[in-house]
Image (spheres, helix red, strand yellow):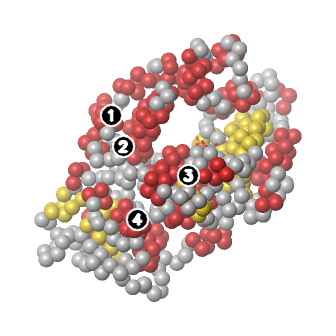
Amino acid sequence: MIPLKRRKKEAAAPSDPVTPPVLFPEVCIFLVERRMGAARRGFLTSLAQKKGFSVVQEYSGAVTHVVSEQNSFTDVLSWIERKTGKPVENGKDKESPHILDVSWFTESMSAGKPVPVETRHSLGTLQSGVSKEKDELFTVAPYACQRHTPLTHHNSGITDALEMLGKAAAFQGSEVRSLAFTRAASVLKSLPFKLQSAEEAKNLYFCGGHCQAVIQEILEDGVCHEVEVLKISEQYKCMELLTSIFGVGVRTAERWYKGGVRKLSDLEDMNIKLTPEQKAGIEHYTDLKQPVSLEEAKRVEHFIKDALNRFVSDLTITMTGGFRRGKQQGHDVDFLITHPDEEAIRGVLKKAVDWMDSKGLLLYHHTKVRSHTPAHRRSTHMDGHETCYAIFALPNLPSDSGVSGAAHVDLISPAARTWRAVRVDLVVSSYDEYPFALLGWTGSKLFERELRRFSWNEKKLTLNSHGLYNTEKNCSIPATSEEEIFALLGLQYVPPPYRNA
Ligand code: UTP
Ligand code: MN
């Protein structure tokens, strides 16, 4: 939900009436529209032309660089053949065109000149008129923020297994191994085809021996032995149970497990000291464990907007998190709140929260005030926004229960309750930080992590949900939209539905 004024600016006409001069006559780019779409193709065309590249609309023998996104080598060749009525040929007196992944294009735009074609850019080569997919060929970019990761993909059996191994590693305190599994799963989520063999994954980033063994087992046996062992492991099951309590992280869960906790009732029986957050998490455990549907999220949104609008009528309130990425369900509902007038947002969250509390709409809430320490602005991991972590009592729809309205039975029978508990996060950001907060709170967690890793490793810039900083020059780099942040990082824009890394 980008304010209208900005949206207009971003949707600028793709083709300029006057084509800027060509600075690199040796390069002639053809962008493959398949999977890229006409709008994005238009945008990339004008971007390249502004930088002095020659981009043609129709494929011809003059093309030197064919650039495509999310297609395999054969996809590209057959698509061009269908469009032009003849196959892409190995030129007789000239070299055949490079068939490239969009990474070559991005890097060239970033460099302001055509970068040399390297193996990792190439989808395959045409040799003596015969198309040959090199090493099964498909490669994806190394950082998740350079790829498109849709919600549904072709390798979920494998990625579920890898993610479970990643979780188990995290439960054992091994962040590094956990991240390796998570990254491998994420790479496979962005593959535009179903893997047929472990061999096909050998050129992919983060898909080393262990990952390939998992792939092979799943393709051959349908299951992965290591995962099957986890599923019946008492430690894994127990850590999964404990970490799914609101307010309980891996460290706490591990401490409890080592102290002998095996089930929720043990916490009370063993007199374990709980934070107010954890107490609320246990009290509403069954409700919170049940995924929030999109329909429920929209009803929550209605209540939250109503509450906030009572105090300031023209706030921008955006549902972020997984729902913004197109998920149909989530573990909570996240909202980001802003307003151009700094005065308007001051205190509005507290007022709305107090009002909802007085109406019995909140079962728990805890507000973290805005942090003013400059450390938040420079650190990659800290988030200093004013944030309310709450458990919302979402009233049932009239049809949900035969006894709706019978509030007095709430404590007697959970089945007859007139509400269900839903985790809600409310975040307030200043207007100038809004694009960064929006990007930071849309996720996925791995996508954010990769964006920050890319910013630092490749651009020596620090990115967080407050801004983008050049730490060497000690200055911040402003942006007015998510699109602009990607552009400042030299990245192609990745729309939210493709940030499901
Ligand atoms: P969530 O944990 O809500 O994940 O964080 P999600 O993607 O919406 O998944 P489900 O559907 O609820 O399970 C959403 C985003 O907010 C950021 C996370 O990094 C993530 O990108 N976030 C979350 C923060 O920046 N700070 C926090 O304290 C919590
Ligand atoms: Mn969420």
Tell me which corner region of the image, top left, top right, bottom left or bottom right, holds residue 23.
bottom left
Provide the secondary structure element on which disc 4 rests: helix
Question: Considering only vertical position in the picture, is 53 above or below 195?
Answer: below
Is the residue marked by circle 1 packed among few (<14), some (14-19), or many (20+) residues within 10 Å?
Answer: few
Which residue is depicted at the point 59% across and 59% down? 474
Tag 1 residue: 210
Percent across and percent down for residue 232 are 46, 20
Q: Say whether mark 3 is within 8 Å of ligand 1.
A: yes
Label of residue 325 in the image: 3
How many numbered discs sit on the rendered protein? 4
Q: Is residue 371 left or right of residue 206?
A: right
Task: Look at the image and tell me whether residue 295 can be seen.
Answer: no
Percent across and percent down for residue 144 are 44, 51
What's the amino acid at mark 1? His
The Cα atoms of the two marked residues, 4 and 3, are separated by: 23 Å
The Cα atoms of the two marked residues, 4 and 1, are separated by: 31 Å
